[in-house]
Amino acid sequence: MFQLQQEEQIAERKVAAYVAKIKSSSRSGLCKLIEGNIMKLATEDLKIGELVHADVGQMNLYCNYAREHWMQPDEHPPVGLILCTDKDDALARYAMDGLGSKLLVREYLTALPKESTLAAEVARTRELLERQAELRQTEHGKSS
């Protein structure tokens, strides 16, 4: 029994040292998100390259550690965000399926698109949001 406790303490110290090393890295971080009145921890990891299944396991480790050691009683469980330059949707889905932690994987651009492309996207998004607002007003008017 004593040996098992010692092994658990050693394993926990190793994980704590690993997480501390990751926290000091410029590509990983920990922050608190506040959504309305809900507070939760978020861990993020910026990957230079494509997503591999080990990235998901690593983020799950961070979230589990954050849940056990940093989460406050009034907070929701931590969320993990992995940013990578390329993502295989099937790999991400199967790697994250069944995990106890909420993980998100998103791609990021390594170069900005042309200014005209950005301007067109902003205009398209603005138009979409305006149409959605008009629909909500119309539906709200009908229900009154």
Image: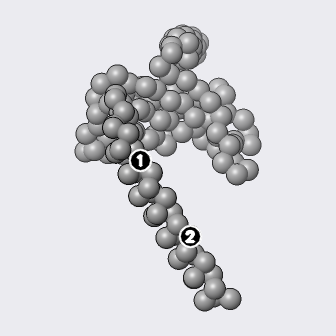
Asked whether 68 or 66 is in front, the reply is: 66
- Report the quarter where the C terminus lies: bottom right
Considering only vertical position in the picture, is 9 above or below 63? above
Q: Residues within 10 Å of mark 2 (few under 14, many from 20)?
A: few
Q: Which residue is mark 1?
A: 119
User: Horizontal and vertical percent for residue 13?
Assistant: 57, 12
Mark toward the viewer: 2 or 1: 1
Q: Which residue is mark 2?
A: 133
For residue 74, which quarter of the picture?
top right
User: Horizontal and vertical percent for residue 85?
Assistant: 32, 30
> Coloured how?
one colour
Mark 2 residue element: helix
- Decide if residue 13 is on the left or right side of residue 58: right
Mark 1 residue element: helix
Say whether residue 52 is visible: no
Please report the residue visible at 62 percent of the width from the left and 30 percent of the height from the top.
Answer: 31
- Decide if residue 110 is on the left or right side of residue 14: left
Please report the residue visible at 46 percent of the width from the left and 63 percent of the height from the top.
Answer: 127
User: Horizontal and vertical percent for residue 34?
Assistant: 68, 43
Q: Residues within 10 Å of mark 1 (few under 14, many from 20)?
A: few
Residue type indicated by callout 2 = Ala
Please report the residue visible at 57 percent of the width from the left and 34 percent of the height from the top.
Answer: 42
